[in-house]
Image (cartoon, grey):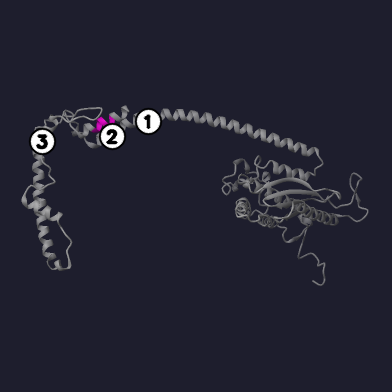
Amino acid sequence: MDRIFRIRNSVMDYLSPRANRRRTMGPSTPSNKATSLMRTLPEALSEPRNRKGQAVVAGRVSKKYLSPSDTKRSHQARRRNVIREDAYEAETEDGYRDSLDNASESSIGVSPADSSSQQPIGDLESEIMENFQEEGQGEEDEELNLNGNDESELSSEAKVKFFLDRQNEIAKRQEELDRIKKEDWHEDEAALFHKLTMRGYEPLLPSNWAYDFRTCPSQLFTQNMNQTFLNSASGNDFRAINALSSLITLGGRVRSLIECHKPQEQLIKKELDNYVKWSERDGNYNTKRFLPRLSIVAGHPDQEIPNITRAITDQLRFLAIRHRQALALPHPGRLNELGEVEVFMRPPPVLYGVIIAHCITLFVTLDSSKVDAQIRTIAHFDFSNADMDVWNSFAVAILVCMVRNKIMENMDLLESESESPDTDPDS
């Protein structure tokens, strides 16, 4: 408040003489002295004092638009008006100079030493702003110091809380992983469960993808390509980023179908099939003959879950038989270094399946090396949850990239379609 009054007083010093100004805190009644001072001031110079000038002003006020009948004499009228205006301006300028001389010699009684109005405007403004900035800067510094201390304390507390919560969550997930290791799980099944469980807590993406996925946490990116799991095996990052970006937008499109009361299964299946096709091109085995390791089954809106589960079970068991037949050795097999009989050239792989029911996707596995193996449920994901769009898409990408990496491990054993003999001579 004091600062406002100081600025007000400085402005008043400039606008009015100091000797004849009354300082008041509120509204005041004008005195007779002030009235007498106003009477001594010169008359207003904006109004002409001679008859000719007043006539010109009156003509300006009452000026009307010319009608078509008046256009004959419009040129002469404009010429007379210009002459009158020049005469009026000359008289006004002379009167203005006389009034200035009279005002400087009036009885106001203000000397240059006693009047602050003689101070240049630039110096006055600089003085006011300088005082204002000095006082305001001190208050701002105090506020910044207080706010900075509060924010630093809050940020430190938030960081500590975030770190503790993160460590607790990692500990819970590690307990789940330890439980999986004690059970009869295949190492590939355990690896998939580990990647799905720890997504968001360990690096997944290359650091040069950070610009395209700016909303993802920084701990998901790394410069060490050996630690990245969602990457481009062919080096074409552009296609890989586009495929993953399309997968991230799947959740929003699914919720749009839900709001319109339309089925979502075929949309999810189409998007998953597109990502699988990208992985085959990225792994450079799309032109080779290979047995698939991933099966996707999408149910109908009125189809029951047991029927969908039966369909995925039949497909995975059929693929398991095909893999065992392709890897089987001639009878009676061969002995390995430990003296054990091997009936396969290499162990049959783990097969993966995706069940799509409404907006839910369910990941399952089947160990094809065991004839009596049962379907094992790994995890399920809900695409109607808007908070999990990124993490659900990462889960699908992890599954598909794991299948890609496993197939690429045996690239040297795959045959190209052009080199393989035709099995049907009539085709």
Compute the Cα span from label 1 to label 3. 45 Å
Which one is in front, 5 or 358? Answer: 358
Where does label 2 land, which residue?
126
In primary-sequence order, the first of circles 1 and 3 is 3
| SS for dot 3 | helix
Q: Are marks 2 and 3 in contact (CB under 8 Å)?
A: no
| SS for dot 2 | helix
Of badges 1 and 3, nearer the viewer stands 3
Mark 3: give few (<14), some (14-19) or many (20+) Cα within 10 Å: few
| SS for dot 1 | helix
Name which residue type carries label 2: Ser
Percent position of residue 80, x then y: 9, 60
* Residue at 50% from the left image edge and 31% from the top image edge: 151
Name which residue type carries label 3: Arg
Q: Is residue 145 visible?
A: yes
Vertical position of residue 417 compared to residue 135: above or below: below
Residue 7 part of the magenta-drawn span? yes
* Residue at 63% from the left image edge and 43% from the top image edge: 220
In primary-sequence order, the first of circles 2 and 3 is 3
Q: Main secondary structure of the magenta part?
A: helix
Magenta region, residue range = 6-11
Where does label 3 land, which residue?
39
Vertical position of residue 400 compared to residue 41: above or below: below
